[in-house]
Each structure stands twice: as structure tokens, then as C-alpha cells.
Image (cartoon, grey):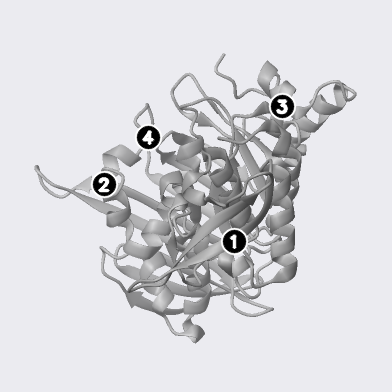
Amino acid sequence: MRPLLSVSAQNFRSLKRVSVELQPLNVLVGPNQAGKSNFLDLIAFLGDSARHDLQSALERRGGYDRVRFRGDTTGAVAIEVKANVTRYSHEKTPDEYRLSFWTRRASRERRVLVRQEQFTFKRTAGRGRRITVSGGKAEFIRVTSGSEDPEQSLHLSTNTLALAALRQLPKSEGGEEIDRVAQLFSNFRVFNPDVESAKQPSRISKRSLSPDAGNLASVIMQLMKDDDVYGDFLDDARAMVPGLESIELEGIDGPAPSMAVKLVERGLRSNTYLADTSYGTIRVLALLALLYDPHPPQLTCIEEIDHGLHPYVLDRLVERLREASTRTQLLIVTHSPALVNRLKPEELLVCERSEDGSTILPAADPEEIRLKEAATEGRLGLGELWFSGSLGGTPL
């Protein structure tokens, strides 16, 4: 699955100038402070903007001055994405969204936020449309081969981001296409389990796994309703959690019905409540629940995926990541050479920090990575190449 084709940014946090092509599975590696989290936050920023508006998204991050690159640079903050989410889009004719914003002085004491936006998408199989927003005016232009014809204009509040406002347009005016682009970002899930929350019983619901895995028990109950899916989930859990034989659920009465997870373990006379299991066991179960989610968002990020996991389970984990990437596009962060050893060159994104404090991403082209791996004739995997510094993205 590849709904997000590429992301480019200028002057967003440490992303002074980056352009990244994305695959179904993308694994980011690099030293601390290189900009991996800033790249993920760029996507989350678009989601916050689609849900709440640009000003709110900036305030959540400390304001414009905290978001704009703090090194030596000029120009606005600019973001451009190419996607494949609307009805008539294709990788060769993608949906495009551009956002740029900056501040200008309104008085001696006050600066105001200014933004420009542009959407380009195909409305039918044969022709497209571009919507350009500058200040408080949105212009709608019909795009055909060799010509551009203005259709109409619409006034917007200068405080309103079109990515948030125009998704409410009627279907005939392009609201459906803009809403699909907005949903791509607003549903973006950054998965970072809170083990203490995941240990606890959870209320019964039909929701997907929450970013903190706080509803893990409820999601496992949902998986149990499909014998084939749950059978595969349990096979993986047995392979990755030593001594695990099966999983049982226990209902908890109360104003809101809840469910607790108990593990049936080989050699023990009684079952073990999830609250009494190890950090690594909960991480494994939460990751598997995420990867077996039958209805995930289009984009999923997993921070520090190898944290708490034994290297022995990584072969199986990478297989499951590739399978899950057919249902949700994955952006993974790792510091594990053992996990990187199991990747393909096109799945690896190397990130590093330049002398001026900006992020270099990608620091190595996939074809360059492939050639360097081939030159070792099987003696070194991608993980060893990366760890040795041959691909960049190391602290030295």
C-alpha cells in the first residue's frame, strides 16, 4: 500500500531542504538528533492542521518560531506532498498538496501568519482541477491538456486552512477529493505503546488499537472473532513469547463492561494476568495486534520498534511488517542493525545531521545502498553496512 508517494519540506524544524520518496514499508535509521522524529512530526503536523487548523498545529509545537528551522536560512516554511488517494489519481498523475506559511509584521508589536495552499487532483478520468488559496481567496481552475480555465472563486477566512475548510465542499466542487487528502494525514497513527496502560483491562469497543495500546484487551477480543486471523496472531505470539500456549479473556462487570487478558503458559498451574507479564511480552502482543488490525489507517508510524524485543524474533517481525504494509503504509524508526540486516535496500531510509544542523534525508540513495550491499557478496548485511558508517547515518 502506497497512498503517500513523496514528501518534500523546506525550513520545517531541522528539515531545511529534504525530499523523500516513500515505499509501502519505510524504516528510518540514524543517530539521535538527526531529524527522524522531525520527519514523522511533519506528517503529524499536516494531520493536526487538517483537524484543527494551521495556527492550532503551530501552537501545539510552541509557535511559529519553534517550528521554523532555527539555522541560517531564508524563505517560508514549505511542505509539498504527492499522494495516490483520490478516485482518479495514479502514481504518474498523483494528487498534490502544497502548503507554505510565514509571518509578516502587522505593527511594531505584532506579526501575523500568512499562508498559501494549492491542491491539484483529477476530478474525472479525463481532466483535472487545481485549487489555489492565497490570503482569503480560493480560486478553482479546470485543467485540461494545454489549457487552464477559471471556474469560480471562494472567499475564506484568512485564519482558516483550506485543508481543513474545503473538505466540507459539496462533492461536485471537489470536497470529496480534498477530504481524502485531509483524511490521509488526520488519521495518521503514531504508535508508541504505554506498557502500563496496555497492561490494564480495557473497555469493550470496536475501535482500532489506540496509539498507546491502552485498549489492547479489547482489540485482542476483536481478533478472536476471526478464526483465521486470530490463529495467525496466536502462532506469532507463541513464536515470539517463550512458554506461551494460548490467551484467555476475562470479563469484568461494572458501569462499562471491560475485558482483561490472561496468558496460559506452559508449566504453570494458573494463568498469568497481562498486568503481571514482562515489558517485552506486552510490546510483542501490542505490535502483533497493530500489525493484524484488519482496518488500519492509511499511514502508521511505529517509534523504536525493536525496543524490548529479542533479536531472535526479528525475522518473523519483518515478515509481518511487509504483510501489514499491504494494508497500511508503514514508517518505522529503529536503532537495531539486526533488524536492518533483514531489510531490502528500498525499504531503508538513512538519516543524518549536517554541519549546519539540518537533516539530510535520505542520506543514501536506494540504488547506492543496493550496489554497496551487492559489493560485499553476502559477507555483510545492510545492518553491518549501516553500523560501519558505509551508508552514513551514524554518530561518527
The residue lying toward the viewer, choosing from 118 and 386, is 386
The answer for how far apart the CA atoms under marks 3 and 1 are is 38 Å
Look at label 2 and name its amino acid.
Thr
Label number found at residue 103:
2
Label number found at residue 383:
3
Q: Nearer the viewer, mark 4 or mark 2?
A: 4
Q: Are marks 2 and 3 in contact (CB under 8 Å)?
A: no
Badge 2: how crowded within 10 Å, few (<14), some, or many (20+)? Answer: some
For disc 4, the marked residue is 69
Q: Are marks 4 and 2 in contact (CB under 8 Å)?
A: no
Badge 3: how crowded within 10 Å, few (<14), some, or many (20+)? Answer: many
Of pointers 4 and 2, the one earlier in the residue sequence = 4
The answer for how far apart the CA atoms under marks 4 and 2 are is 14 Å
Look at label 3 and name its amino acid.
Gly
Q: Are marks 3 and 1 in contact (CB under 8 Å)?
A: no
Q: Position of residue 120 (x, y in %)?
A: 54, 66
**203 left or right of 105?**
right
Of pointers 2 and 1, the one earlier in the residue sequence = 2
For disc 1, the marked residue is 248
Of pointers 2 and 3, the one earlier in the residue sequence = 2
